[in-house]
């Protein structure tokens, strides 16, 4: 069965999007790393209270157990701590989500993340970088793919900087525990949300214990989370303590030994290509932007 015009238009926009994102990072002198698909340890995505991972995928090879990549945060930290000041990778991620995640319209259990890290950066530096990316990439793609967007009856709003900034505490007080989509529906442009208690590698605010120097970018119109990131913890003893609290210290012992005394301050984040594409083309469900979708709970044919 041949693909229809709308599906071809989405794939043409995807091709342009991948090209321009890569050009954006290249023009800013990022080193592009090759993706890592298997590792002795990967991002546990813990203790994020919003996580819904069923299990971490593993394979056995020559008597060793390797995990499928959930994100390349540990590899990025190694890279920037060993002299690469700015790194980016188009990283395939496997996150085996619970089947009910299908109903969100934005979850895949296999997706591509643009994962980047900047040595000695603060969260404000990342905000400027990402806002520049949005304006440059979205502005360009709206011009070169004008016909495709016309076919999809979709017009891109290019935001101006700086984007609005909220805290998760503010939004929880305003909208309740499940604030993300409600807040997203209330906005016309992407916005930043600060302070989440989640992964062991995020830096706690030294001036306000219990608060964290991390962030999410949220798309408007109900499309939800676009990007997650943060400033990184460099105190190996704090990292060890957090891993012990979630029962993961033994699993990450080789990482801890490797990075002992070597971690440097950095900040970064990652955004899903499919989620950005979904927002740009106005797709109701993320399966519409993948030719071979991997949706939690749905059967794979090819």
Image: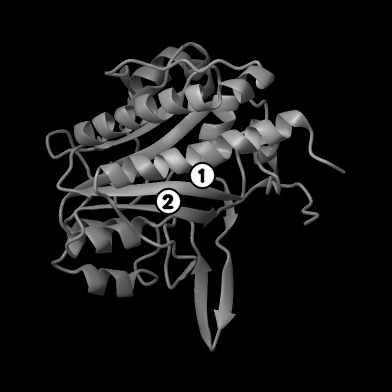
Please determine whether, in this image, residue 90 is positioned above or below residue 61: above
Q: Nearer the viewer, residue 78 or 28?
A: 28
The N terminus: image quadrant:
top right
**What kind of element bears circle 1?**
loop
Residue 46: mark? 2
Q: Quadrant of residue 104?
A: top right
Q: Is residue 126 shown above or below 67?
A: above
Q: Relative to 47, is 29 on the left or the right?
A: left
- Which one is nearer the viewer's eye here, 20 or 85? 20
- Residue indicated by mark 1: 51
Asked if residue 107 can be seen in this view, the reply is yes
Quadrant in which residue 149 is drawn? top right
Circle 2 packing at 10 Å, graded few (<14), some (14-19), many (20+), is: some
Picture residue at 15% right of the left edge, 56% below the top: 264
Where is residue 137 drawn, in percent x and y? 41, 30
Instruction: Judge from the rendering whether residue 151 lies leftward or rightward of residue 84; answer left or right.
Output: right
Please report the residue visible at 44 percent of the width from the left and 57 percent of the height from the top: 44
Pointer 2 or 1: first along the chain = 2
> Image check: 124 left or right of 291?
left
Q: Position of residue 190 (x, y in %)?
A: 41, 21
Secondary-structure class at tag 2: loop
Q: Is residue 4 above or below residue 258?
A: above
How many labels were placed on the picture? Answer: 2
Query: In the current view of this chain or complex, which residue is farthest to the bottom?
Result: 62
Say whether marks 2 and 1 touch (CB < 8 Å).
yes
Residue 230's mark? Answer: none
Identify the residue at horizontal 19%, vertical 54% (top origin): 85
Identity of the residue drawn at 67% across and 21% down: 152
Q: Residue 296, image x and y in percent?
A: 68, 46
The Cα–Cα distance between marks 2 and 1, rounded to whole angstroms, is 7 Å
């Amino acid at each position: 069965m041949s693909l229809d015009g709308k599906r071809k238009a989405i794939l043409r926009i995807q091709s342009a999007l991948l090209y321009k994102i890569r050009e954006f990072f290249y023009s800013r002198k990022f080193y592009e790393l090759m993706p890592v698909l298997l590792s002795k340890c990967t991002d546990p995505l813990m203790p994020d209270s919003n996580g819904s991972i069923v299990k971490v995928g593993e394979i056995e090879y020559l008597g060793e157990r390797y995990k499928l990549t959930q994100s390349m945060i540990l590899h990025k930290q190694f890279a920037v701590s060993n002299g690469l000041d700015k790194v980016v990778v188009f990283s395939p991620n496997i996150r085996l989500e619970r089947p009910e995640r299908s109903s969100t319209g934005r979850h895949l259990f296999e997706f591509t993340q643009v994962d980047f890290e900047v040595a000695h950066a603060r969260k404000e530096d990342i905000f400027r970088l990402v806002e520049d990316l949005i304006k440059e990439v979205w502005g360009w793609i709206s011009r070169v793919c004008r016909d495709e967007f016309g076919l999809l009856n979709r017009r891109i709003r290019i935001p101006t900087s700086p984007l609005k900034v909220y805290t998760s505490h503010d939004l929880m007080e305003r909208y309740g525990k499940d604030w993300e989509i409600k807040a997203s529906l209330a906005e016309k442009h992407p916005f930043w949300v600060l302070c989440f208690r989640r992964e062991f590698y995020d830096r706690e605010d030294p001036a306000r214990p219990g608060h964290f120097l991390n962030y999410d970018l949220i798309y408007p119109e109900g499309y939800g989370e676009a990007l997650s990131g943060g400033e990184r913890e460099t105190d190996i003893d704090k990292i060890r303590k957090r891993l012990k609290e979630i029962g993961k210290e033994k699993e990450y012992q080789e990482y801890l030994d490797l990075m002992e005394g070597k971690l440097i301050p950095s900040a970064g984040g990652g955004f899903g290509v499919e989620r950005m594409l979904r927002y740009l083309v106005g797709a109701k469900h993320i399966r519409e932007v993948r030719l071979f979708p991997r949706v939690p709970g749905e059967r794979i044919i090819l």
